[in-house]
Amino acid sequence: MKKLTTLLAAGLIAAGAAAQAQDDPFTVGFIYVGPIGDLGWSYEHDQGRLAVEEAYGDQVRTIYQENVPEGADAERAITNMILDGADMVFTTSFGYMEATNAVAAQFPDVLFEHATGYLRETPNVSTYSARFYEGRAVIGHIAGHMTESNIVGYIGSYPIPEVIRGINSAFIHARQVNPDVEFRVVWAYTWFDPAAEADAARALIAEGADVIMQHTDSTAPQTAAQEAGIISFGQASDMIQFAPTPRVASIVDNWAPYYVRRVGEAMEGTWESTDTWEGIGPGMVEIGEMTDAIPEEVRASATELMESIASGEYHPFTGPLNRQDGSAWLAEGEVADDGTLAGMDFYVEGLTGDIPN
Amino acid sequence: MLRLEKRPAPSQAWGIGAPILAVVLTMIAGGLMFAILSLPDAGLAAAREAGEIGFGEYVFGHIPVMIARGAEAIRTIFWDPLFHERFGPFLRGQLLVKAGPLILIAIGLSLGFRAGIWNIGAEGQYIIGAICGAGFGLAFYPSESILIFPGMIVAGAIGGWLWSMIPAILKIGFRTNEILVSLLLVYVAESILALAATGFLKNPEGRGFPGSRNLARHPGTDNPELIAGTGIHMGVVAALIAVIAAYVVLNRHMFGYQVKLTGQAPRAARFHGVDPNKLVIACMGISGALAGLAGLFEVSGPAGQISIDFNVGYGFTAIIVAFLGRLHPVGILLAGLLMALTYVGGELAQTRMSLPASAIQAFQGMLLFFLLALDLFTNYRIRGRRREVAA
């Protein structure tokens, strides 16, 4: 094989090798799980990368790789970036957790930022995530007001704490304003698969859902909602191209301030290993523009809810709350602790169906 | 006028030459695609904007830019992973890590393909092998006994074998089409994988997140690099053994003779006493077991754990590798390495040249396209049509 490739490659040595200035600017690598054109999760992380470039200009060089599978291939992608001179690497999906820590152990001088994980085995690894459930509370509130069939369809990706937390948060706040509302959850077992997401949306619509929420990254559910003439919420990214309907509002992940801040700290040498979990208040989670399709008083009450969450006055998981089986979880006025939220593996009372496992 | 004429016998020269020519054509067409992707050149556009160059210079100035860009992409994909001073030492090992499972699975598939038995579901057998092997290892957690890994290997092979027996038995008993059944079982296997990662194999200390315990970082269940820095793990060794074994079986063994005969002349094979049902069981079983082994070596080594997205398509890519290698063991070895090179080099081109992932996939697609197109010349030749003589 070596011989063959030598042969093949021999004809190509003539290629003009572009001389590259190495290791001069601070190099930051980004590993994306989807295509940056997904208009959802990876798109928003890439917006964060562009914000870093914007903020530091010639002082930084950014590199990225799309569609990196979560597993063995991630280790290679990260290592390649480091060999290419990366001083800092953002790995932007939960599935890169083991790979990030494995590579971090080999390169103690490189800084690592892993999104939505919890493992920080060496002092050069940080983790960060957003309190998406705060945004879910706001759109749950809107959904509770808007549904006429009293059935909200929810497309879950995988039954993991982050997704379960989102379902609970949305449901609690829909029920607060509409005691008759019910949630139907479909597990798509994918983060990004337009065809599967569209099928899930259509199945939910066929069951009578007139509001679709999604915890997957493509815009396919928006299209399905549009065809059915019902409403939906943008996910991860604003998905504003579907406004004013079906998309009546959205949860936007805004990674840019965090990325700019952390890259800045790394360049100054003040970077430290941390676990960051920020929500609406610091701006990591944003609610995209609420369109005119939402009645004015609902927009007002949703804004009020958003502001009380942002100020810390209200926590979306405040008692009294029971678990699905009726057992007590939070007493009157009690607020859920981060540890329980981080590992949430149960539905709250009122939700129907089982969490698959 | 040109017409195709069937050759009396398949051309040996084309059999060997077609894959090489396909690679060369892919380099040219791919280079052109990468060159076009770089248009318009920012430097030239700026010069044109500033009025430094005329329109003609602007247009023709792109020619050297495109050539350099295309050549750089091809060099990054085919040369840098092997010989680049910084990337080479790391990526040469990664090449073996990537090629190992491809070769192991493709060798198994090639036996069936030669006999006209189409196991398209190696991806599913790979998944089930990994789940069974990992399940065996985790059942004894936290034991670090040296007996566990051999047990995992056996469990992995049996898992893949059992999963392949479903289409095999349905084919024999009910004459179902093994292509459809084995393919659809991939999706069943993927669902079982999701269940395993979020349910029965979930790490009890994983804070509710999906994914099993890490097998690669626990002594006793790990499949480590045998020589540090080379990427060679047990799965790579197994792939090499499979290549040699397949070569011997095909050339020296009765079973290999039966496989080849069935592929070339099924009726004649029957007269020679070849039992087609036994052959289906054997070919499906071997390919399933090897795919299961590949899954086990991957889950205990490079991947490290059962996760929702554990499978990355080795089972499907191995089909391409099998045909790229002409269903010949040595050909498969080379094809597996070449395929791995396009993956590893393609990733490098993505980060180093900011090429989109889809362009790399299109590039890999071109390779298959040219190969299939040139394959025609193994069995056919082009003849200029003679004028009919007027009577």
Image (cartoon, coloured by chain):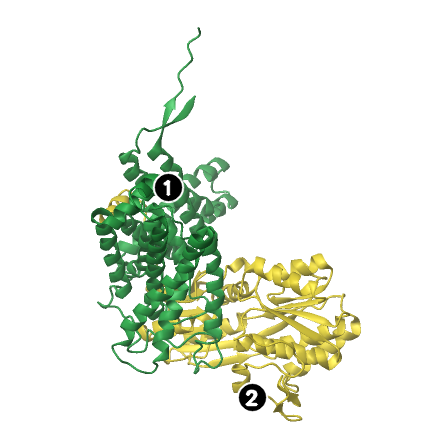
Chain colours: A yellow, B green
| Residue B307 point in image, percent of width and height | 43, 70
Residue A76 vs A169, above or below: the answer is above
| Residue A172 point in image, percent of width and height | 67, 81
Residue type at mark 2 is: Asp
Q: How far is the residue under mark 2 from the one under mark 1?
A: 59 Å
Judging by the rendered image, the residue that carries numbered circle 1 is: B371
Residue B219 in sight from this viewpoint: yes
* Residue at 26% from the left image edge and 61% from the top image edge: B238
* Residue at 31% from the left image edge and 41% from the top image edge: B271
Residue A92 in sight from this viewpoint: no
Q: Are marks 2 and 1 on the same chain?
A: no
Disc on res. A288:
none
Tell me which chain the residue with mark 2 is part of.
Answer: A
Residue A260 vs A195, above or below: the answer is below
| Residue B358 point in image, percent of width and height | 47, 52
Specify few, some or many for label 2: CA neighbours under 10 Å numbering under 14, 14-19, or 20 or more: few
Residue type at mark 1 is: Leu
Judging by the rendered image, the residue that carries numbered circle 2 is: A337
Quadrant hosting residue A245: bottom right
Tell me which chain the residue with mark 1 is part of.
Answer: B
Please state which of residues B257 and A215 is positioned toward the viewer in this rendering: B257
Q: Label 1's element?
A: helix
Nearer mark to the viewer, of 2 and 1: 1
Specify few, some or many for label 1: CA neighbours under 10 Å numbering under 14, 14-19, or 20 or more: many
